[in-house]
Image (tube, rainbow, N blue to C red):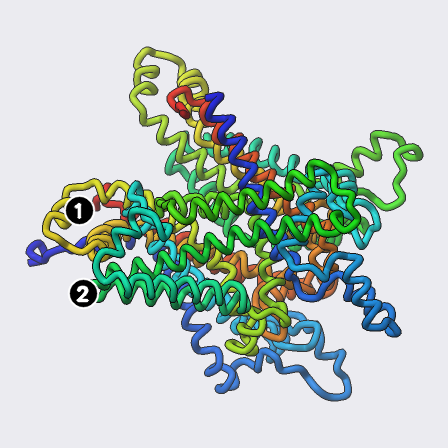
Amino acid sequence: MAQNRIETPWTLAWRRFRRHRMAIFSLGIIILLVALALSAPLLVRLGWIPDPNLQPEGPNLAASYFLPPGTPGHPLGTDELGRDVLSRLIYGGRISLLVGFTVALSSVLIGTLVGAIAGYFAGRAFLFFAGPASPTYRELLGRGGLAVVLLSLVGLGTALYLFYRTEPGTALLGFAGALLAAYLLNRLPGLGEKLARALWYGFSWALLLGFAGLIVDVARTLAEPGMARGDLSPIELAGYYLAHLGALALLAFGVVGRIALDVDVVISRIIDFMLSLPGLPILLVLSAFMRNPESALGKLTASLFGEAASVAIIILILVVFGWITTARIVRGLILSLREQEFTLAAQALGVSETRIVFRHLVPNAIAPIIVDATLQVGLAILVEAGLSFLGFGIQPPVATWGNMLTGAQDYIFYAPHLAIFPGLAILLTVLAFNYVGDGLRDALDPRSRV
Amino acid sequence: MLAYTLRRVLQIVPLLFFISLVVYALVALQPGDPLEALIFANPRITQEEIEELKKAYGLDQPIHIRYFKWLGLALQGDFGLSRTYAIPATEFIFQQRLPMTLLLSGTAFLLAVVIAIPIGVYSALRKYSLADYVITFLAFVGYSTPVFWLGIMLLLIFAVWLPELLGRTEPIFPPGGYVTPGLDPAEVGFWPYLKDRIWHLVLPAFTLSVISMASWTRFMRASMLEVLSQDYVRTARAKGLPERVVVYKHALRNALIPIVTLMGLAIPGLFSGAVLTETIFSWPGMGRALFDALVEKDYNVAMTALVFLALLTAVFNLLADLAYAVVDPRIRYR
């Protein structure tokens, strides 16, 4: 009997989702769009649509430009170079969906990770810095002192080398590698934790030294021309000496002091900071920056992705801003979930913290995360189209819905179809994702019952 | 409350410092330096002259030094010259471009408020009626539409299709700009001039307002429904108050509370989101200025605009939080 079947929350959710007619309809549209995007090369090979970048050749070229929709062989007409609009639309859909899904998935994964860490460790400060003469470090020296000192010096040396002798990109990679090394050390039985901390403190010393050095460096360079002329104003002179004094005080503190940081506070500040950035303009700046062929980053993306570099760049910069919403949602949920009895039970059983976060807490927050992911697909497609439209996104000849519209405005008097169809495609796709998100929100809400 | 406000105001200072630092780094590391155009224009330029120019512009120094130099001058109100227009960047942004953006964003904001609130309330009062479904659908379409495409479609309709249909040669609404070129208020009189300005404002303002309009309608509806199910609304009804008083005095006032925050938070977005609208309608505003500055590597202008937008965002975030406390006495900040 049907009543005897066990109903998981997912079957219940599916039943509720099915009742949302627009959502089901939209889901059908999305599946259709995905199928169309996946099969595009096949359609070209079958000869059903021409190649999206195929330009007509022959004596009377003008006759094949700006053909209106309904022309035989070109159901949606041709563009200013005689390329088939329908084919470009289908190929543009490949890019839009690729960008949408990749951005949403990466943003949600990163956002969930960051939000979960912030929420779970909120209120518990981590020792970020401990000077060589601080009580914490002296305690660490107790057993295996020599190994501790050696590892700290290795950390200090590596960090200083990375800061002063390498490109920013390499430094970042090196820093990530060192963090990984510390993490792996931490997992070693016995002295592992001690050694990991030793390595990390060495690194933190370099951070402090580097910061003090930066202050002095800036003060010196700014004051240099004035000093050479001997016309520094008293305020400037005071600033110059104050900077030196500050750096010295920082170093003195660094010998004996400790700095504890609450991960949650740090992450929340970063989120506040990101939210204060003017969104679209910053995306424009970031996009131009990443495409710089002279910078290390520009070289890296160009060598990694070749032709598709602009797609990769767009995905990257959308993820830079995309994780924030997810992180805020997940952080809030985890903050309340970690106070509940099942978390206490898991802690009492001695379950590891990683396991508590990812097996006990995050699965309980999955419903809003899924809804957020769906909405982010639509948003990413919209923003990508906007950036590509402005010429700061995906570059021609790769066809996208956004860059198909770039020139379209100039032709609206005699070729309005060039402006209509790409925009309709964006609208339809984004609308479908928003409706599915809405349906999921209702379906996954445990308070609503069928 | 005062202590809270002061603390938040003080927090804006380090925030702006970090934002300007990040933005400066990004802008300064843009492809090609500002000298490129100069070098390009003079093919006989020697390497020494390039080095000298670099020195004169301070480009020979590392980026953190350049940042602090820029900061020192910026704190005294000197944001440098615009390379394209050869006037101070602040004069260009604040005197020429900001008023135009204020006009556009302000109109769009008002338009969104005036349309979204009544429609949202109506939609909530007629829950699950045909009108409600239509409004909900339109709201979904509204925030799924790419702004720039909407602009192009409005141009197509009002400058191409409708005039054709009506047999007119003139577009219904002008396709771009903020005033008919050469129109002089001294010549044509004040009212025709004002009409011309308003005519130019209609399409861009509507385009810019659509996303806010759509999302506020949805929020207003949800907030109103939430309030209408509260006990005090039932009490008001039970006392025999007229429905009008219940809805507009008891329910609407409370339903507006969360909307106020939402609107405050949306204002900076109206400024920075105007880039696309201003591009479509060739509106000489700040978003357009920023876009052009990035394309033409006019860094002083780009920095001025970006820092101003960041300040605006920070200030309106604060104002939204404070407004929340003012309109909702249950909220206490410490």
Q: Nearer the viewer, residue B211 or B42?
A: B42
As displayed, is residue B292 above or below residue A120?
below
Amino acid carrying mark 2 in the image: Pro
Q: Earlier in the sequence, mark 2 or mark 1?
A: 2
User: Residue lying furthest right in this view?
Assistant: B187
As displayed, is residue A422 above or below residue B86?
below
Q: Nearer the viewer, residue B250 or B274?
A: B274
As displayed, is residue B149 above or below residue A337?
below
Q: Is residue A379 toward the left or the right of residue B171 in the image? A: left
Q: Is residue A306 visible to the viewer in this orientation of the structure? A: yes
The crowding category of the residue bearing disc 1, from other C-alpha atoms within 10 Å (few below 14, some 14 to 19, many at least 20), is some
Q: Nearer the viewer, mark 2 or mark 1?
A: 2
Q: Is residue A262 toward the left or the right of residue B79 in the image? A: left
Which quadrant is the C terminus of chain B positioned in? top left
Q: Is residue B46 toward the left or the right of residue B199 in the image? A: right
Residue A189: numbered disc:
2
Q: Position of residue B255 (x, y in %)?
A: 42, 27
Q: Chain of mark 2?
A: A
According to the picture, the residue beneath numbered tag 1 turns out to be A343
The quadrant holding residue A200 is: bottom left
Q: Position of residue B306 (x, y in %)?
A: 64, 47
Residue A323: numbered disc:
none
Residue in view at x 36 percent, y 56 percent: A201
Residue in view at x 72 percent, y 62 percent: B60
Amino acid carrying mark 1 in the image: Thr
Residue in view at x 12 percent, y 46 percent: A345
Residue in view at x 66 percent, y 55 percent: B152
